[in-house]
Amino acid sequence: MKSYTVILLLSLMLIGCKNKENKQELANKEDSAELSKNIEAVVQDYIDLGIFSGIILVAEKGNIQFHKAYGLANRETKAPNTINTLFDIGSMNKTFTSIVVKQLVAEGKLNLDDKLTQYIPGFKDPNANKITINHLLNHESGFADYHTRNYFDLPLNERKLNAIVERAKSYDLNFEPGTEQDYSNLGYVILGAVIEKVSGKSYFDNVNERIVKPLNLKNTYLNDFSGLENRIAHGYYYTPLGELDESAPLQDIPNPDGGFLSTTEDIMTFYRSYYYDDLLLSEEAKSNDSFFNYLKELPDGKATGSAGGFEGFNTALYQVVSNDFTIIVFANMDEPVAEHIALDILALTRGETPNKPQAPAIQNVREAFNKNGAEFIKANFEELTINFHPKDPKDIIINALGYAYLYEANDVDKAIKLFKLNTQLFPDIANCWDSYGEALAESGKKEEAITIRPNLESAKNALKDLKK
């Protein structure tokens, strides 16, 4: 299967503190000024590499200590990013969705142990009858992603919530619900459908009435972006071949798994309310929630967070819960730059020296491959790909580069070498073998392609075509 786009993933991260003494609190203006100076130095390293533009916010107990925008929101018009520029927050949407679900549970309208099919029937896979609301919340449902190869070619109506759910009814699950955990955007879209069924209102009306209005999030937009064109950041990313490209300002229409627009200050307001007050969730609701019970047990100085992104955008938040210390980074460049910068700032607050940033992993691999060949990549793969999202499978790096050479650069020889290398690095990943076989077939070596792991279930259709 071709892999051109990595849909980024919301990640819940618990970041430890090496220092015995907690240093997050900024005791005075001198501390704040020193932190600002150090942040500027860190950010400049990323700017010098050409991999960051966006906004950074640092706050203590809701009081902003550092808030600055960098680079351009639109490179064509030269419009700069400002602290009020609107960014697609990606999978941060999922926190909004989970809160609405938990509110409905607190109101007695929903139970976490309820079966999905009580609300949304008609799934083909018999194991779907075992999926609970809790499985969907915790990515334990077995649903894969809904961003298929041709997803973005679908008409607008086919990319809306209900159409996605209807297609999902024919999908096979990847595992029996509750037996594994695998990140699923689709699971959260389906939760949106459950919200609509239980409440009798649209998903977006629920979020607006239950979260946006109560928190007075004046710069958070859910699904009506008319008139906002000049405020929205455009996303930029380097293609696998190293060319800077632009993603659409709105990569996809908003759904319960991603796509809201917001500002750094609104996102700080939202997450601080989620963590600290009872406006969104009552103390009783939090006391029965495993996530909040876990937060109570976190040692001082540890951070929890969330992130989101896709081609050209990356958002990240780290919250040191014990000290109410907030770090937010929005980037209109490719992931995981926002997460790296946020972690660097977190290190600074602990008196640590962040590592120097590196170019994106796929660019490191491409340059090393062209200079030193496949064997060098094989021997140095981990070092070359250290700057890669920790939650994403690394086989997609070489796979994406191989397809770029195969179909964009029309260099089938390089593509074959890269795909073959990927099968050596990741011999148990079926997609690596499929890609290798596809490249061999494109080069005219059909007999060799047929011998590529013919027992793979995923290769059966390709083999039928080749044998014709």
Image (cartoon, rainbow, N blue to C red):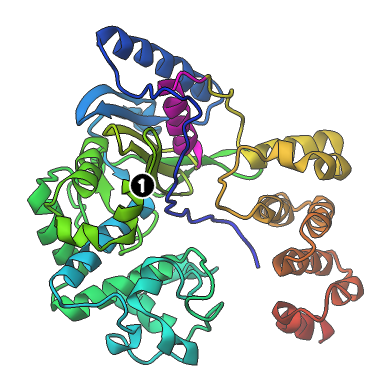
Left or right for 320, reference 335: left
Q: Position of residue 317 (x, y in %)?
A: 36, 40
Q: Position of residue 56 (x, y in %)?
A: 34, 29
Q: Quadrant of the N terminus?
A: bottom right
Any part of residue 89 in sight: no
| Magenta residues, dominant SS class | helix
Q: Residue furthest top?
A: 30
Q: Position of residue 92 (x, y in %)?
A: 34, 51
Write down the quadrant of residue 448 in the picture: bottom right
Residue at 12% across, 44% down: 218
Q: Secondary structure at mark 1?
A: loop
Left or right for 230, reference 304: left
Q: Image height check: is 16 above or below 128?
A: above
Observer-nearest of 224 and 21: 21
Q: Image height check: is 168 above or below 38?
A: below
Q: Position of residue 360 (x, y in %)?
A: 60, 37
**Number of numbered labels in the structure image:** 1
Left or right for 31, reference 459: left
Observer-nearest of 337 and 81: 337
Amino acid at pointer 1: Glu
Left or right for 233, reference 404: left
**What residue did someone put label 1 on?**
297
Q: Quadrant of the C terminus?
A: bottom right
Q: Mark 1 packing: few (<14 Cα in 10 Å), some, or many (20+)? A: few
Any part of residue 57 in sight: yes
Residue at 13% across, 51% down: 278
Observer-nearest of 437 and 379: 379
Q: Image height check: is 194 above or below 149?
A: below
Over which residues does the magenta segment extend? 336-352
Residue at 46% across, 30% down: 341
